[in-house]
Amino acid sequence: MKRLDVIIVNYNSTLPLLHCIESLLNAEGAISLTIHVHDNASSEKDDVDRLTRAFPEVRLTKNHSNLGFAKAVNNALKQGSAPNVLILNPDTLVQPGLLSDTMGYMAEHPDVGVLGPMIFDGDGAIQGSARAFPNLLTALFGRKSILSKIFPSNPITRENILTARSDGMTPMEVDWVSGACMFVKREAFNHVGPLDDKFFMYWEDADWCRRMWQKGWKVVYFPRSSVMHYVGVSSETNVFRSILEFHRSIYRLFDKHANMPYSLLKPLVFWGVTYRFLFVFAAQLGRKCFRPSKTHPPWNSVLETPKANDLRIRVLRFIARLNIGGPSIHVHLLTTGLDARKFHSTLVTGKISPSEGDMGYLFQSAVEQPVIIEDLQREISPLMDGRAFLQILRLLRHKRPDIIHTHTAKAGTSARLAAIIYNRIFNGNARTVHTFHGHVFEGYFSRTKTSMFIWIERILARSTDVIVAISRTQKMDLSEKFRIAPDHKIKIIPLGFDLAPFLRSTALKGRFRNSIGLLSGSILVGIVGRLVAIKHHDMFLKMAKIFLKRNPDIDAKFILVGDGELREELEARVETLGLKNHISFCGWRRDLPEVYADLDVLALTSENEGTPVSIIEAMASGTPVISTDAGGVLDLLGRQEESSTAGGFTVCKRGVLCLKNDEAGFAQGLRYLITMDKKRLEKITGEAKSFAMNTFSNERLVHDMEALYLEMITK
């Protein structure tokens, strides 16, 4: 069996690397591959160790610093023994036939030391990967120079880019080929020597090929085989370093190979390269500041180009941002949980505000990361919203989704508008779904703005195939109260969560209290959520003041779990109310099962809600709940118990319900809950736990959503 060593140098490109190796293994045929990956100190966030988890057969070497491309390749060359070596970039996808065809050709032509296949850009254009050795005009008429873009057919560029001379089938000898995908005969490597590691990155391939020719080995461009190359995935992480090393290597190549009389021009070339570096870097800064932002990482937007033989339903999901809360958990479950045999689901999201907690960590172990559109964000900005719209439209045209599913108001507006254009102008055939996780029709804006948003939603609803409400109360609001859409167009699909950690939370009792230094005898009342106006934490603080004054016999402590734009204001409010010794701010916590295990009561004081996640988590944990009557809370707490209304609160089947903005009634309800008969409390929390398990499981959510998608496609 033929043997081949594959060498890949990785730097913060593990996601495309995983797909690169998958394409290699799918294309290997009757070839024994030994894959060497040398990682140049990628960041912890890049998580190169997931490579070993996905492909244990790959030999991973983790360098303690960034050695550069040439030095890392040389180290890998020493570890192999196969007669041929494939040097490959991590941001490439191997096309069928690459390995067998190229190795067969090299076996038939023993004088070929280096071979480079045809290389395609991500958009399908052929890269100029076969080239002539650079000369003094290459800087002006190189593959990506401004003059080559303005005058693509000029004779100087054609002289430099030899790919243009190829007929697309016949192998041809060239000066050098790109190191993005380069086959090297080990015998030639032993004869010529390794790459010059004084080239940190760029132009080491041109230098090596020149030395191959000098030692009598041929360099061949082989267009019968190909790879896809998504240029610059790793170099984009540090644009300044990338541009600097490119120009340093240009000068080193000239300095190393220039003979008389050209060597006399070294001072001129040095300053010419320096000025070119400054110009290119300034141009890159200008593009970054003034052009529409790209979707990052760009790999995701091109990696999963729909294939003709892929009959799965393509779902493109949009959410404005992955801030802490139920919608982020919801889209994570749907993006990763759909049956991969029937659906291909991609998540598109925007940028987190500095004052918000980030739940992007949910996707750390996902093979396909969310596509990030930086201009898609919380704040309203005509310029950024316009750029986000164009990015979304371009993504729709590229992905060609069967279903466009939007979540939250901002993403719902931009993506559904883009869907209208995509379907009516670009002949798309995508069905659209929008999920209301809550709504902005109460408690958020002035009457004028609210009316405007209602009319926008009514207009968008006309072109939306299905609107998803997450509770019965929300459906009534959308169809009857605000008349967003007719009843028949609205489907109720409750949220879903992985509740297992909360169902087992009793085993964690005591940990959270110990972490905040709280004695076990105190009654602990907590509110969990973003510190924003709609959550009405000020009511929570006022209620605590009233409760402590009326119940001096109860040792109660109050905590706020979460963070947000109002934190400083709320901390000052605590000082003003004289509650410093009774109230603690805990910030965002990932150990929420531990928090609920030690809470005696979960409180919610919101003015508006969809289906509040904190109540569902508390129910699953067996923690009693008291809440204002906001949005879908009534659907969670259930029907009113007989003869239980007193003092401004209502005892329901699964918790206590209070009026909005009634601190005194809330305080009274809290006392009632704390002093309730133990058996009755156990009945309420038991009912709540069963309700949460049966209604909000992630399996139920995924099943319901798959059924909806299939129904829409069938229609």
Image: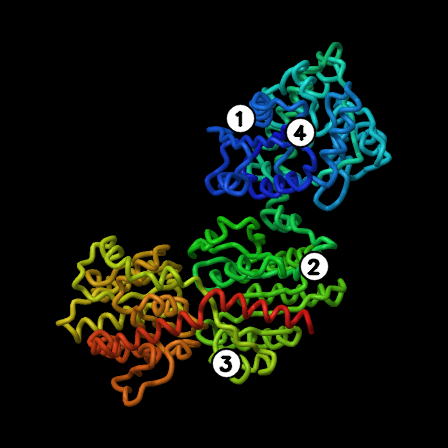
**For residue 452, which quarter of the picture?**
bottom right
Cα–Cα gap, marks 1 and 3: 60 Å
Q: Nearer the viewer, residue 655 or 34?
A: 34
Which quadrant holds the N terminus? top right
Q: Quick check: 627 above or below 215?
A: below
Tell which circle, 3 or 2, labels the residue nearer the N-terminal end.
Answer: 2
Of residue 286 and residue 461, the one placed in the foreground of this image is: 461
Which residue of the protein is positioned furthest toward the top in this rendering? 260
Circle 4: element type: strand
Cβ–Cβ under 8 Å for marks 4 and 1: no
On the rendered structure, is 329 left or right of 342? Answer: left
Mark in the foreground, 4 or 3? 4
Q: Residues within 10 Å of mark 4 (few under 14, many from 20)?
A: many
Residue matched to label 1:
67
CB of mark 1 within 8 Å of CB of mark 2? no
Q: Which amino acid type is shown beneath numbered disc 4?
A: Leu
Camera sees residue 378: no
Q: Earlier in the sequence, mark 1 or mark 3?
A: 1
Upstream in the sequence, badge 1 or badge 2? 1
Amino acid type, callout 2: Leu
Circle nearer the viewer, 1 or 3: 1
Q: Residues within 10 Å of mark 3 (few under 14, many from 20)?
A: some
The quadrant of the rendering that contains the C terminus is bottom right
- Residue 228, by quadrant, is top right
Q: Which residue, given by chain and number where applicable, does mark 3 sit on? A: 477
Q: Residues within 10 Å of mark 1 (few under 14, many from 20)?
A: some
Q: Nearer the viewer, mark 4 or mark 1?
A: 4
Give the residue type at disc 3: Asp
Q: Are marks 4 and 3 in contact (CB under 8 Å)?
A: no
Mark 4 highlights which residue?
Answer: 86
Q: Which mark is residue 311?
A: 2
List x then y, in percent, for residue 155.
85, 30
